[in-house]
Amino acid sequence: MRSPFLVFGALLLAVGTAAAGTISISIVPTATLEGDDLTVKLRVNNSGDEAALSVTPKLVFRDAEVRGKGTPRLEPGTDFEETLSIPAGQLTDGRWPYKVAVDYTDLNQYPFQALQVQSLVIGNPPPAKVAVARLESDGIAGSGSVRVQLKNLTADERKTTVSMLLPEGLETGSPRQEITLDGWEERAVDVPVTNRTALPGSRYPVFIAVEYEDGNVHQGLVSQGVVAIEVGETFLDRHRSKLPWIAGGFVLLWLILVTARAMRRQPA
């Protein structure tokens, strides 16, 4: 039986626990703009005590994606470096979110993914005027949601694009939403999330990227939260509170049947 899989954000992004040990994958990205290309130098480390197999990094920017060569096996306590580049086009000053993921499997060939989302900073942009006040979830079994609390920090209207970035195993039908915030408005946005392959008892990092134009500056704010994967409810779990009533109904029905049978047996 497989033990829980734990994933956590910041630089330590994925920890997989199996019967033989633990895989702990961390990603350290360094991004630069070289001509019209976004170039990210990655250092991928396994600080667990079990080897990770088929370790392959990939870089995602806007709607483009590029996969690296990776390594067929990453032993405990070792790391490797790889540089990925992707066409970025002409970017204005500001903050531009990008995603780095590392796909790998454990010794049982079960797939996992470590995830990191950061922003490439171009020029000297001012602080963002939209904040993510909260990013939280009550937990996900088969399905659930992540609530994002947005806050406009100025009196100016902001037309934002809110993107939910999830590791593989989790899926949303609303990965990108266009949301207009009035001046000083604070709004909660619920993003539906479905569990496809995430293991119960695990914790996965999730990221929100909020982007908008501020004059000639592109603002991209990245915020991170954690989603707990729960065991799905069984039929008995969903109807546990009704069991006494159901049992009482069966007892009453049994008494009615016994009484009716006894009455039929009485002589006329």
Image: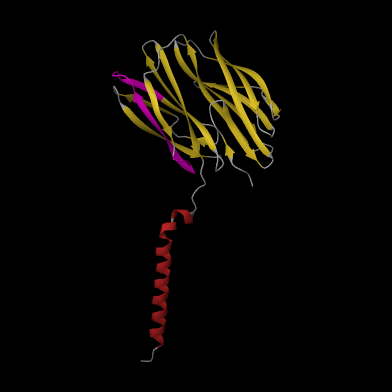
Q: Does residue 201 lie above or below 131 as drawn?
A: below
Residue that appears at 35% across and 21% down = 159
Q: Position of residue 216 (x, y in %)?
A: 39, 10
Q: Is residue 128 magenta?
A: no
- How many marks are shown on the rendered structure? 0
For the point 63% across and 24% down, the residue is: 44
Queried whether the magenta region covers residue 154, the answer comes back as yes
- Give residue 147's quadrant in the image: top left
Q: Where does residue 185 sit, x and y in percent of width and height?
A: 30, 26
* Image location (x, y in percent) of residue 260: 39, 80
* 176 displayed left or right of 13: left
Please determine whether, in this image, residue 55 is positioned above or below residue 143.
above
Q: Is residue 91 left or right of residue 80?
A: left
What residue is at 49 percent from the left and 44 percent from the top?
Answer: 142
Which of the image's four quarters has the C terminus?
A: bottom left
Colour convention:
secondary structure
Q: Nearer the viewer, residue 243 or 173?
A: 243
Q: Locate residue 162: give its quadrant.
A: top left
Q: Which residues are magenta?
A: 138-161
**Residue 178, x across and y down, in percent:** 38, 26
